[in-house]
Amino acid sequence: MDEVLLRNLTPVVLGVLVRRGVDFAAAEDAVQDALVEAWRVWPADPPRDPRAWLVTVAWRRFLDTARADAARRRREDVVDEEPPPGPVSGVDDTLQLYFLCAHPSLTPSAAVALTLRAVGGLTTRQIARAYLVPEATMAQRISRAKRTVAGVRFDQPGDVATVLRVLYLVFNEGYSGDVDLAAEAIRLTRQLAAAVDHPEVAGLLALMLLHHARRASRTAPDGSLVPLAEQDRRRWDTGLITEGVAILQTALSRDRLGEFQAQAAVAALHADAPTAAETDWVQIVEWYDELVRLTDSPVVRLNRAVAVGEADGPRAGLAALAALDDTVPRHTAVAAYLHERDGDRSTAARLYAEAARKALNLAERDHLTRQAARLNTTPP
């Protein structure tokens, strides 16, 4: 395999696709797929014209991806905005693809990344953001995963835990508003719950339903974010909440606690509170303690610091926050919130502005900018 030739041809092929009207990011993904195929095929069957071969394969990969995206959008169009409650019969090809991409030859993290890209329809940038790694790092991870499964027989589907992780990340991306995949993730998780008797599958479905129940209240008419404490709880979907809580209670009764059940328990406590002031923060802290034990995730520890600040006061929350690396996403925003609750408005305003510059999306940036402006322009 002539690595120098491939490196030299990569920008040439990329330029051809861009001139044909392909979006640059999509062109990069298509060229990457073509390079992986070249590594697999060329040693045994080298092409007479490597440039033409790469252009042809990259173009076909782009068309395949475009058709798959169009088909996915058509599936989303026929799904009701609010997923209907109740069991679902049968498992469609999409869920089967999730299992096949979670191949035993891949590490769980590589399988999740590959599935999100190949089946979930997420971009490399969105996947990188979900994993808290640079986009270039995630691109390399996905490329390695593709090389690993090239030529592998897909007769050994992956495990449930990996598929759950993929569905959870797809739902989170849909729930953020960047890609409307939340309903599709719920649909597939319903099918998985109908096919697999596993408490964590039920836990994930309950978590999705409880979060989705609040969707209508998460944004104002102008598109701005509405924090949980300020949401109009009359707009929450009580049907989804009731279903989610019932599913969670059944899962918890089996005494096989997992992280999705614990997260769903936190969501259920928020849903159960008639007002933000009546939230049982002490019990939420206890569930976050369980989540820390199960995952030791820095994001979980960050959320726990917020809960501690609500249960035991802002200074206790700041003490919990001080134990965390300040590079954890939204660390600065949490610090701003806790400082404001502690009465230090000037520090809070500065931190809100700093957090806005680090925000992961436009809606979040605008919200944090408004928070900083509010503290800078209104009297104490």
Image (cartoon, grey):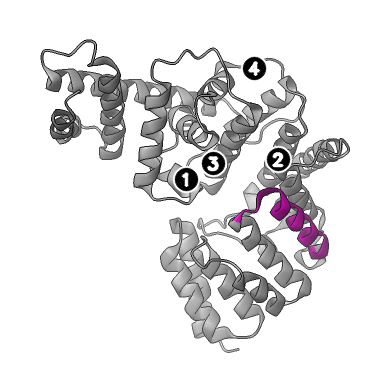
Residue 17 appears at what percent x and percent y?
A: 20, 30
Badge 3 amino acid: Gly
Local crowd size for mark 4, using a 10 Å CA cut-off: few (<14), some (14–19), many (≥20): some
Q: Name the residue: 54% across, 66% down.
A: 325
Which residue range is magenta in the image? Answer: 281-297
Q: Is residue 297 left or right of residue 42?
A: right
**Residue 80 seen in the figure:** no
Spatial separation of the CA atoms under disc 3 and disc 1 = 6 Å
Local crowd size for mark 2, using a 10 Å CA cut-off: few (<14), some (14–19), many (≥20): many
**Residue 244 seen in the figure:** yes
Q: Is residue 19 left or right of residue 152?
A: left
Spatial separation of the CA atoms under disc 3 and disc 2 = 13 Å
Q: Secondary structure at mark 1?
A: loop
Spatial separation of the CA atoms under disc 4 and disc 1 = 27 Å
CB atoms at circles 4 and 2 under 8 Å apart? no
Q: Tell which circle, 4 or 2, labels the residue nearer the N-terminal end.
A: 4
The residue to which callout 4 is attached is 91
Q: Nearer the viewer, mark 4 or mark 2?
A: 4
The residue to which callout 2 is attached is 209
The residue to which callout 3 is attached is 174
Rendered view: 373 above or below 38: below
CB atoms at circles 4 and 1 under 8 Å apart? no
Residue 28 appears at what percent x and percent y?
A: 27, 35
Pick out the residue farthest to the right.
253
